[in-house]
Amino acid sequence: MRHRSLLILTAVLTTGALTLTACGSRDDSNNSGSGDSGTTTVVIGLDAPLTGDLSALGLGIKNSADLAVKQANEKKYVEGVTFKIQALDDQAQPSSGQQNASKLVANKDVLGVVGPLNSSVGESMQKVLADAKLVQVSPANTSPSLTQGQKWNEGTKERPFASYFRTATTDAVQGPFAAQYLFNDAKKKKVFVIDDKKTYGAGLAGTFKAEFEKLGGTIAGTEHIDPETKDFSSVATKVKSSGADVVYYGGEYPAAGPLSKQIKKAGAKIPVVGGDGIYSGEYIKLSGAEGVGDLATSVGAPIDTLPSAKEFVANYEKAGYKEPFEAYGGYSYDAAWSIIEAVKAVADANDGKLPDDARAQVAEAVGKVDFEGVTGKVSFDEFGDTTNKQLTVYEYKDGDWVAVKSGELAS
């Protein structure tokens, strides 16, 4: 196994320029990435919500993938190749994601796709990309069914699409991790569970609920909400009447922030807890002072504590992106790099040439990547899931999210 740091990028090729043919357009003009003539353009597609309520997370994903591409070009990591990003906005809508997948398939220069943010959008894109043998690496999808099939929770795991991977761990881990923290560490015994009925939210709430009950906790009540309404007063009243000492919400920050505020104003002075979908600076803005003390779990260790991430953080700031990298920045950077590494592996194995079936070979090569990235070790198991299972609990205090516990799910 070759050991490389993708932040420092010390493994720079010292051989002469490779002649890459057969896939990707030949560009005899100066390319923005390398400035050399006669290089091959390889496009990494990106799909995320770049506008709308979830754009804070989506823009962090886009910027981080863009940084990976810029650094690969600066270092000429794959000699003779200029990488470019084609970023498309899905507005967190499955139908838009599916249309974007078709657009990316139609561009013959696209050899891999980073994204999306939402599991429901990922679900809509999978078959379109898989039919074209175009690899997809999500930095944020957490629904277990995307990699392990619809019957994963019944003990039958079957990978639906061989071209789909993710650098974020799943809700099969995240939900129970939150339940263990609340029951064992925070000593919460009675929870009211709410979800937004979406693929991500309902799935996360379901895995949390099962583990909390298994541990001996009491479910004080359950409720579904329409996240578009933003009026959750009736649910807040039910929470207050239930006697719950904590609320668990499966969903995302645009609804979670107002929900927390309204629960507190209804008189239930108890914390609201959610998954990585609420782990954003936007949640702090939306929940306001009432949200202080709320908790969120997110994938991986706190990025500012990882030695492997220090240079990423510095380079992101140096690049001058207007938006923060948010919860999934490091995972997006690593997702883009997994595709870059795969392109390099395919070129190296083909005497410096990208073959006619480069898409299929890149998809296969992604499954074999193994390197140290921003978020730690980047590699995938037989289902396309990350082998990095670490999670962190964060608490909203002092105007920010503060890590209170990191680790892996107890067996």
Image (tube, rainbow, N blue to C red):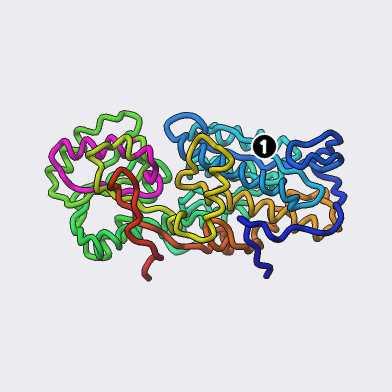
User: What residue sits 65% from the left and 36% below the top?
Assistant: 86
Q: Give the range drawn in magenta.
A: 255-283
Alpha-carbon neighbours of circle 1 within 10 Å: few (<14), some, or many (≥20)? Answer: many
Label 1 sits on a secondary structure element that is: helix
| Residue sitting at x 87%, y 50% | 19
Q: Position of residue 129 (x, y in %)?
A: 64, 43
Horizontal placement of 314 versus 25: left or right? left
Quadrant of res 198: top left
The residue tagged 1 is 104
Q: In which quadrant is the N terminus drawn?
A: bottom right
The answer to whether 38 is drawn above or below residue 216 in the figure is above
Measured as percent of width and height from the top left, residue 353 is found at 84, 52
Q: Which amino acid does label 1 sit on?
A: Leu
Residue 45 vs residue 294, the one in the foreground = 294
Q: Which residue is drawn at 58% across and 49% down?
A: 333
218 relative position to 18: left or right: left
Answer left or right for 380 relative to 348. left
Residue 284 position in % (x across, y down): 32, 40
In which quadrant is the C terminus drawn?
bottom left
Residue 29 position in % (x across, y down) = 84, 33
Residue 241 lies in the magenta stretch: no
